[in-house]
Amino acid sequence: MALAALVVLSLGFALIPAEKPAPAEPPFSERARAAALAEALALRAAGMQLASTGAADPAVLDPVVTLLTIQARALLSPAAGSAPATALAWASPSSTARPISAAGFVQAMAGSGTARVRDAETADGGMARLLAGTGTAQLLAAGRLATALGVPAPQPAANSEMTSAGPATTIPCPAPSGQAAGPATAPVGSGAGLAADTRHALASAVSAEQQAVYGYQAALPRLAPAQAGPASEFLARHKELSAAAEERLRLACGTSVPQQPGYVLDQGFLAAPAMNLGRLEAATATSYGDLVAVSQGQDRAWAVSALRAAADRAVRWGADPGPVPGLALDVSQLPALPGDAGSPGGPGQAPTTGPAPSTGAGLPAGSGQTPPPTAS
């Protein structure tokens, strides 16, 4: 009887399935991506609803719906079979609540943009750049919508490229600047390799700011009096940004970027300086997008803030910084939303017609084109 009881108990223990362990929480970058996707889809649906019910002018809302559609496509997971339902499951209930009025829609757009920018300071690499650009575009769209719809403008978060992030921490350089900045001194993916990438991106930002300063100096005499005031203010800001980027590069043990003696301006730039200053600002935003992707800590926060400011200046000159400022998107390469094969496209990054170095020297490494963000 004891043997029989032992056999029964052993079989019972063997047949009772063990409890499945709780699924591991996704990494922060994946949760931030999923939340951003859920917000974009919810806002897109709300915008379409407002337009269909006549609660707001469809001509004003259609560009915003297109923007949100492109952003949602860019935020889709590269994993096969990923669907928006996955993102909605990870998003907070409040983030997916649909606005019921035009004013609520504007506030929701601003809230989503602020959250994306905040998450960009913590997310990994390419996802940080995608989130920073997505949030920047949503904040800009919220401001334009408030003006067009005649509703209260969203309260801007305290953010300035001069004050949002403190100075870089001073650390002893382990080697002379020329050696420390070499791209082949550390394996890819290591801390030293990341620091080298940050130095290259900072050098690219310094070069972009130097070009912007030259472009504004050349454009000022050709601008209308009403445009000269803002241009003078933006010129001073670019000089400050150039000095700040140079200081961060120095503290990161990088090699100082030499000032070019001049830049070649094409006739298109000189004929329409205001329009081309906007394109020049959009190109500057791309340099800061590269820096966001490879930096961390205070350098990342500073780059995110500078990216937002560059996109805002581009809009003030009438330029379109793209659906994800700081990232050159090929919309035709983005996946379609599941169940929405006819997803509308949108404008990509405007081509840069700003000044090019007259010496023929290329930009520092780290300023090249980036692949579609779904591979990040």
Image (spheres, rainbow, N blue to C red):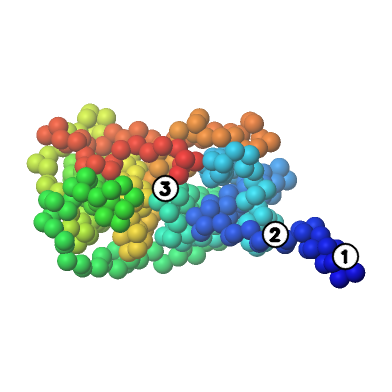
Q: Amino acid at mark 3?
A: Gly
Residue 279, by quadrant, is top left
Q: Which mark is residue 126?
A: 3
SS type, badge 1? helix
Q: Amino acid at mark 2?
A: Lys
Residue highlighted by disc 2: 20
Q: Position of residue 80 (x, y in %)?
A: 59, 38
Residue 353, by quadrant, is top left
Of the pair 9 and 35, the residue shown nearer to us = 9
Q: Which residue, as the protein is rendered here, is positioned at the far right?
A: 1
Q: Which residue, as the protein is rendered here, is positioned at the far bottom?
A: 2
**Residue at 32% over, 42% down:** 283
Gap in Å between the C-alphas at discs 1 and 3? 62 Å
Binning the other alpha carbons within 10 Å of mark 2 as few (below 14), some (14 to 19) or many (20 upward) gives: few
Gap in Å between the C-alphas at discs 2 and 1? 30 Å
The reply to whether callout 3 and callout 2 are in contact (CB within 8 Å) is: no
Of the pair 208 and 3, the residue shown nearer to us = 3
Query: In the image, 340: left or right of 77?
Result: right
1 or 3: tag closer to the N-terminus: 1
2 or 1: tag closer to the N-terminus: 1
Q: Position of residue 205 (x, y in %)?
A: 25, 49
